[in-house]
Image: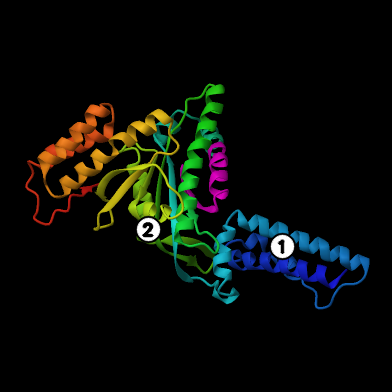
């Protein structure tokens, strides 16, 4: 065996060792394999054929172990902590970073699940998750966790800046909708009804860390940005939108590409005092629907600006003009109703125009 090959195999096993170290406490059943992997790196270069074969077998075993661990802990998480050295992988380690967070959820899942037997439900979820996985990975993201029928994904573009991360997340959201269309076509051919999903995307600072106890450790992402992304996904059905993004996300994405979108509202979500301006992404829609929504976007934007200054008559004028252009747009009716309710309410002096959700 050449020295170059030995070094290459040692490097591969070392990467597997990083993953092993993170999960050793919570995956004790794999302790025997981990020990076998740790014995792969020889003190001297192995020269005889039998030893070379054993060396290759151990390296292969270590790589299989690595692949198994990646099903529990995303490789990107390991890469993040590995940058700081192996000794930082202890329980309670925390690092702050700016990432894009994406939440995706099936609309009406509770009612849908009630119609299925347990095995049918599991088959459906696995089939759905399998199709949603590729759009996320192909855009540089990784799934942090599955929460019931929901998916939480992170986008931390390696070596990239904020705009790269936000751009990856929005492209993934668009690709998710395309994958959903293909999946629904397959479901229709099999006699099943189609499903709809809502997606929320926010870009901002988060804390990545390890939490747990002595015998159970897990990776996690926490912070205000996670809550915002989660709340945006929850607002998608309320605004009859497929993809909802924050103003911070739009600002970052705009540095990389032009996306078709329109402002939805100024909202205050649970767990946060500061208002958030939210937008609907339209690129995935058919031409007729997209153009119709873009046609009324300026009137909604101007009407919202008037609402924030309590100029109710002017606001209603903009919204009513929009309704003449697109009478079936539920967003326009939403804003008209908000104005009519607010103009007769006793609002506090510091009211900023945001709607609480």
Whole-percent x, y for residue 122 in the image? 54, 37
Q: Using a 10 Å C-alpha cutoff, classify the residue at mark 1 as few (fewer than 14 neighbours), some (14 to 19) or many (20 or more).
A: some
Mark carried by residue 33: 1
- Does 98 sit above or below residue 173? below
Mark carried by residue 320: none
Quadrant in the rendering for residue 302: top left
Whole-percent x, y for residue 17 in the image? 67, 67
Out of 32 and 53, give the one closest to the viewer. 53
- Does 75 sit above or below residue 314? below
Q: Are marks 2 and 1 in contact (CB under 8 Å)?
A: no
**In this rendering, position of residue 271 left or right of residue 176:** left
Q: Residue at 47% of width from left, 50% of height from top?
A: 169
Residue 330 visible in the current orientation: yes
**In this rendering, position of residue 95 left or right of residue 346:** right
Tell me which label, 2 or 1, sits earlier in the chain.
Answer: 1
Q: Residue at 69% of width from left, 59% of height from top?
A: 65
Residue 130 lies within the magenta run? yes
Residue 145 lies within the magenta run? yes
Quadrant in the rendering for residue 285: top left
Q: Residue at 63% of width from left, 58% of height from top?
A: 69
Whole-percent x, y for residue 138 in the image? 58, 48
Report the span colored magenta. 126-152
What residue would you read off at disc 2? 225
Q: Using a 10 Å C-alpha cutoff, classify the residue at mark 2 as few (fewer than 14 neighbours), some (14 to 19) or many (20 or more).
A: many
Q: Residue at 45% of width from left, 33% of height from top?
A: 113
**Callout 2: helix, strand or loop?**
helix
Q: How is the image coloured?
A: rainbow
Residue 147 visible in the current orientation: no
- Does 6 sit above or below residue 126? below
């Amino acid at each position: 065996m050449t020295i170059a090959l030995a070094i290459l195999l040692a490097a591969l096993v070392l990467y597997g060792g990083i993953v092993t170290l993170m999960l050793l406490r919570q995956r004790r059943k794999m302790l025997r394999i981990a020990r076998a992997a740790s014995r792969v790196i020889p003190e001297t270069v192995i020269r005889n054929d039998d030893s070379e074969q054993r060396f290759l077998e151990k390296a292969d075993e270590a790589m299989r172990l690595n692949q198994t661990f990646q099903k529990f802990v995303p490789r990107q998480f390991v890469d993040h902590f590995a940058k700081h050295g192996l000794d930082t992988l202890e329980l309670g380690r925390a690092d702050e970073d700016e990432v894009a967070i994406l939440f995706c959820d099936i609309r009406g899942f509770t009612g849908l699940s009630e119609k299925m037997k347990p095995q049918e439900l599991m088959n459906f979820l696995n089939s759905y998750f399998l199709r949603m996985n590729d759009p996320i990975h192909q855009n540089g993201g990784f799934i942090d966790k599955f929460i019931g029928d929901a998916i939480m994904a992170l986008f931390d573009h390696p070596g990239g800046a904020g705009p790269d991360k936000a751009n990856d997340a929005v492209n993934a959201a668009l690709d998710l909708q395309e994958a959903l269309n293909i999946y629904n076509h397959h479901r229709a051919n099999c006699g099943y009804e189609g499903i709809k999903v809502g997606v929320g995307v926010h870009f901002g600072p988060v804390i990545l860390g390890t939490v747990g106890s002595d015998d159970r450790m897990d990776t996690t992402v926490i912070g205000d940005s996670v809550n915002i992304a989660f709340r945006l996904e929850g607002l998608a059905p309320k605004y009859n939108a497929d993809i909802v993004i924050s103003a911070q996300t739009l600002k970052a994405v705009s540095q990389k590409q032009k996306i078709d979108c329109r402002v939805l509202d100024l909202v205050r979500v649970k767990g946060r005092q500061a208002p958030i301006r939210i937008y609907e992404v339209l690129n995935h829609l058919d031409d007729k629907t997209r153009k119709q929504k873009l046609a009324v976007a300026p009137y909604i934007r101007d009407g919202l600006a008037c609402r924030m200054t309590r100029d109710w008559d002017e606001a209603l004028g903009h919204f009513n003009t929009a309704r003449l252009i697109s009478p079936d747009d539920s967003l326009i009716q939403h804003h008209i109703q908000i104005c009519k309710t607010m103009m007769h309410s006793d609002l506090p002096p510091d009211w900023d125009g945001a709607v609480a959700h």
